[in-house]
Structure formats: C-alpha cells, structure tokens
Image (cartoon, rainbow, N blue to C red):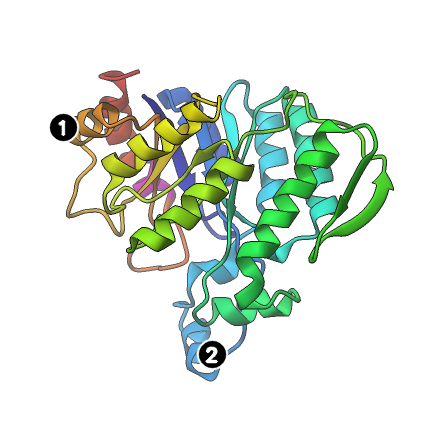
Amino acid sequence: MKFGAMIYQSAGTISAVEFARIAEQCGCDSVWLGEHTHRPVTDDERALLKHGKLHNHAFMQDPWVTLGAIAASTTNITLGTAVTLVTHRDPIILAKEVATLDNLSGGRVILGVGYGHPREPYRTEMMNHGTKPSDRFDVVRERVLAMREMWTMEEAEFHGRHVNFDPIWLFPKPIQSEGPPVLLGSSGGSTRETWEKRLAWILEYCDGWLPGSTEPHLADRIHELRSAACRGGRPAYDVTIHWSEARDTADPLDESAIERFESIGVNRIIRHFTPTPSHSQFYCREAVLASFKEYEKLLRKFV
C-alpha cells in the first residue's frame, strides 16, 4: 500500500512546497494538488468574499507551476494531480507542461484527469473555457488520447471532433516511456450503465482509476476493472482512492480501514488534508503539522 497527501494549494496557507517536503519526510510516496482556474462571480458569494469565507477553490494556485516548485524542492516523491480539469486546458499546452515536468523531476509525474462538475458554479467555470458541459466526457477522452500521441510519437497527429491537428513535433518527450500514468478521477456512478461507461473509458485511455473512498461497490468495481484489463493484456492497473478529512470522517482512516482497502486491491490512499474550519479557504500550518504527525504514525505500520 502506498500513501499520498493532498491539499488545495493557495496563497495565505501553508506553502505547498513545505507541505510536500513534510509529506516526503513522513513516508508518503506522493503529493497531490487539485485544480480550479477561477471562480465565477455570483451575487450570493460576493458577501462571502468580504467576510473571508469564499470557497477555497477561488484561491487555488496553478497545479503545474506549483508542482514544478515542489519538484525542485524534493527528491523522490511522486507529483500528482487529483485532478487536472482537462476540460479547461488546451491539450498541446498541457502535453508540453506534463512532459516538461516529467523531465525536470526525473519521471515522477502522475496525471489524474477529471471532467469537471456539471452543477454551478463549476458549469460556468467550464463554459468560460469554451467547453459545453454536455461535451465534457468526449472532450476529456479526445484530449487525453491526443496527449498520449504527443508523448509517444515523434510526429504526432490527431483528428477528432474536439481535437484536430496535422503532424506536429512536440519535445521534450516524457522520461516515462509511455508518458506519465493517467488516472481517471471519477466516481463509477450510481447505476450499472454509468459504471460500464466509466469502465470503458478507463480501459481505453487511462492507466488506472481514482475514485473516492466512499465509492459504492468499490470492491466489485476494482475486481471488474482488473479482470477486464487482464483480458485485454494489461493486468497492472493502478487503483488510487481519495480519502477526505472533511467528507469521510464517518469512515475514519485507521488500521482496519487501510487493511480493508488493501484486501480489495487498492494500491494507494491519498489523504486530503482539510482547511482550518474557521477560515474555510486556508490551511493553518500548525493544524496541518499536527495532522501529519497522526498520519505518520499510521504510515509507519504499513510502509
């Protein structure tokens, strides 16, 4: 079992670089950052900003710039996103950013990808980038497939409905020969039909799955994913779960939970540290350090 640590990186909080250094010292194999490029202005939230209670998504720093700083300040820890909002990004620029960081870090990148939320204000956030919410699944698929071409082919080209370019050269290539592993950061959904769609996407253009720790039918879905991958000649599929202090306190991350996750085939647990409750957008350094002490005690029993 591997263990990661995650925060929503922002100004006015513990430095993401310091957070990553502590995570590395505590025995974490990876550090993870999220992404929201901006927060659409609404009348309801204007008052929250004035009172210092606006959602921390509004304050998040760019994950790839921040991971570059972390790469320069750490040695071995893996650099991941949970998740990059591919619906918000030009695939050629993102492919270049990811490949560059993989080179600079010595091949330490994992790319978690997500579709974005269809509800407000995230729907407007997505539309501000020119993506229709109804197109988000197809957009992510094409952009990831196009990036894989750019990472692995000397002359890459792609022709789809949302991504279309004739042969291009894009260097540097990632150090990881097939490109950084791509994990689909998504729930499997509440219905069989939805899960079958997610499963098909994971098998087509991803190297693993990144659901929440409260994912319904998690054990069955991991088994089905691994079985389908094995039949297709790809048995090594990564399953990383996202455990949030804020959402998952009813199901604490303790020894028994870790043993249970390990028994069903989970490869890594990302612990998402939460902001200080009295300042919803900020992470108090002292509170984070205290949480890391508890996390480190737990990790020592498994790492």
As drawn, is 159 to the left or to the right of 75? Answer: right
Q: Which residue type does callout 2 highlight?
A: Arg
Is 216 above or below relative to 122? above
Magenta stretch bounds: 285-289
Q: Which residue type does callout 1 highlight?
A: Ser
As drawn, is 112 to the left or to the right of 288? Answer: right
Residue occupying the point 37% across, 20% down: 27
Viewer-closest of 202 and 232:
232
**SS type, badge 2:** helix
Q: Mark 2 — residue? A: 46
As drawn, is 268 to the left or to the right of 33? Answer: left
Q: Residue 215: x percent and y percent?
A: 27, 46
Residue extending furthest bottom? Answer: 43
Position of the C terminus, as image quadrant, is top left
| Number of numbered discs | 2
Magenta stretch encompasses residue 286: yes
Circle 2 Cα neighbour tier, 10 Å, few/some/many (<14 / 14–19 / ≥20) = few
